[in-house]
Image (cartoon, grey):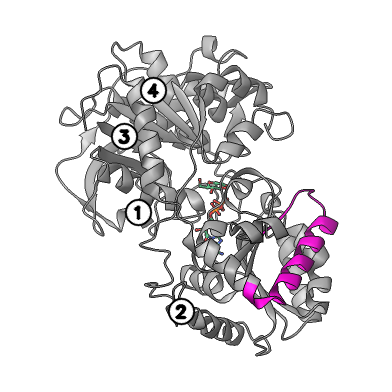
Amino acid sequence: MKVLFACTELYPLLKTGGLADVATALPTALQAEGNEVRRLLPAFAALQAGVEIKGPALALSGQGGPALLGEMQPAPRLLLGRLVSTGEPLYLLDAPALFHRPGGPYLDPDGREWADNAERFALLSWAAAWLALGGDPAWQPDVLHAHDWHTGLAPLYLHLSHAQPCPPTVFTVHNLAYQGLFPLKAGLHLGLPPSVLQVTGAEFHGQLSFMKAGLQYAQAITTVSPRYAVEITTPEQGCGLDGVLRAHQGQLHGILNGVDYAVWNPATDPRIEHRYDASHLAGKALNKQALQRQFGLTARSDALVFGVVSRLSEQKGLHLLHEVLDELVAQGGQLVVQGTGDPGLVDALQQAAARHPGEVGLHLVYDEPTAHRIVAGSDVLLVPSRYEPCGLTQLYAMGYGTLPLVHAVGGLADTVTDASLENLDDGTASGFMFDEFTSAAMARAVRRAFALHRRPTDWTAAQRNAMALRFDWQHAAQAYQSLFSTLIPRAPAP
Ligand code: ADP
Ligand code: GLC
């Protein structure tokens, strides 16, 4: 079947988080299953740099879209191109006034939301709907697969088109906390009639919610782990949308993300100094030494090295780390942290590094190669997230024999098996898990990591268990494909 995959990031060209990894790997895996997939993204400069444009641009035209569609000069258009790296076809939404800017895809260089984000992502959503309805006469998708709030208006625009037949939309929530909230009256400039700016439509506590639009008007909703799919239907984790999600429970599915083993594999990874596999773990010890050197840590082979590769945001629970850090060092541990984000957390980490020279090392930037070196060289990867829709770094860590230490939520709970005595005995232990979201509970998990490390045979067994796990994208792609087929009454055989 033909799938239009609408999103905003694509590894390695433009990435702020795991969505970029998914947007690269999942369409490729869907293609391997025999589907034809085309991505649609805004023509951000970083993306355009990796795309070879093929053929003439498509002029966006039609009724009922955002007002700026008819106002912008030059008029927005769609470019059909191919990824230089893989040759895969994709559409870029070319609207330089909206997407050619310094700063990030969502935030300006000072870290503030772009003031016109409603218009920017409404246009992306509208372009997705337009393509779904046959805007490109040469390629009409059977299904629209839209990702996160940035594309949340796409199923609403399809609904408003009253087109018959109308391709179904699957809306995937990667993070319910980012909702795309704007003043309700902005909706009128986006071509949304008052009838859908109601509580039964896209209205959310007096505002317009792109996320809620996606949830209300898509034919199916997915999120990125089975556990998170349940959690978001509760008031604790529902970010105010749990009622909407409960109302759509029959259409809500949790499909676990995968790992791109072409990128994250210690046996082939060109970004690490020493390659290794489960039968040759000596290479891992050499990567640990290299990591200690890179981060200016004391070269102690017996030190338990804890790593963090993360956005430094409220979601990631790193204030718990801050509270257990002194104890972790006092027990003989070392810590390396790579991340960018919250200035308060950056400040606290810098103070900790100053208190513990040679034991705590920081790299407060976005750096892909060093992320691989931390995953390979650490003994334990810390992911104490308050909530985690899926989480990819714990999956990467397990493949590298680095035991994740995680809070038991969302995708973390679905993928890590705690190194309890019974799980060690069963040969399933693959990391450390704490239930209560408190620094005391995390500190106990840290102590258990030290205790297991003093039992080298058990430690190595847990490493091998973790390395034997497979989180293949093929599995996820098959789950999406069967979901798509249930929505398309007479889907052509792939
Ligand atoms: P989220 O999408 O919530 O940030 P995930 O665990 O799903 O969390 O994905 C995070 C992705 O971003 C991983 O590929 C991780 O390696 C990467 N990442 C996060 N911070 C950095 C950083 N500072 N440098 C390099 N990669 C990073
Ligand atoms: C979001 C989530 C993360 C997930 C990623 C990819 O950024 O925070 O848990 O792994 O999307 O789906």
Say if residue 91 shows up in the picture: no
Please give the residue where the numbered disc 2 appears in the rendered image: 280
Can you tell me whether the CB of the residue at mark 2 lies under 8 Å from the nearest atom of ligand 1?
no
Q: Please rate how many residues cluster around mark 4, counting C-alpha atoms within 10 Å: few if below 14, some from 14 to 19, many from 20.
A: many
Q: SS class of the residue under badge 4?
A: loop
List x then y, in percent, for residue 488. 31, 20
* Residue at x-position 58% and y-position 27%: 209
Please give the residue where the numbered disc 3 appears in the rendered image: 4
Q: Are marks 1 and 3 in contact (CB under 8 Å)?
A: no
| Quadrant including the C terminus | top left
Q: Nearer the viewer, mark 1 or mark 4?
A: 1
Residue type for callout 4: Gly
Q: Please rate how many residues cluster around mark 3, counting C-alpha atoms within 10 Å: few if below 14, some from 14 to 19, many from 20.
A: many
Residue type for callout 1: Leu
Q: Are marks 3 and 4 in contact (CB under 8 Å)?
A: no
Q: Nearer the viewer, mark 3 or mark 4?
A: 3
In this picture, residue 85 sits left or right of residue 305: left
Residue 405, placed above or below residue 23:
below
Say if residue 444 shows up in the picture: yes
- Lower position in the chain sequence, tag 2 or tag 4: 4
Residue 65 shows which numbered tag? 4
Residue closer to the observer: 11 or 258: 258
Q: Which region is colored magenta?
A: 432-457
Q: Are marks 3 and 2 in contact (CB under 8 Å)?
A: no
| Quadrant including the N terminus | top left
Report if residue 445 lies within the magenta region: yes
Please give the residue where the numbered disc 1 appears in the rendered image: 47
* Residue at x-position 48% and y-position 18%: 192
Q: Nearer the viewer, mark 1 or mark 3?
A: 3
Residue 342, placed above or below residue 254:
below
Residue 384, placed above or below residue 335:
above
Q: Residue furthest bottom?
A: 299
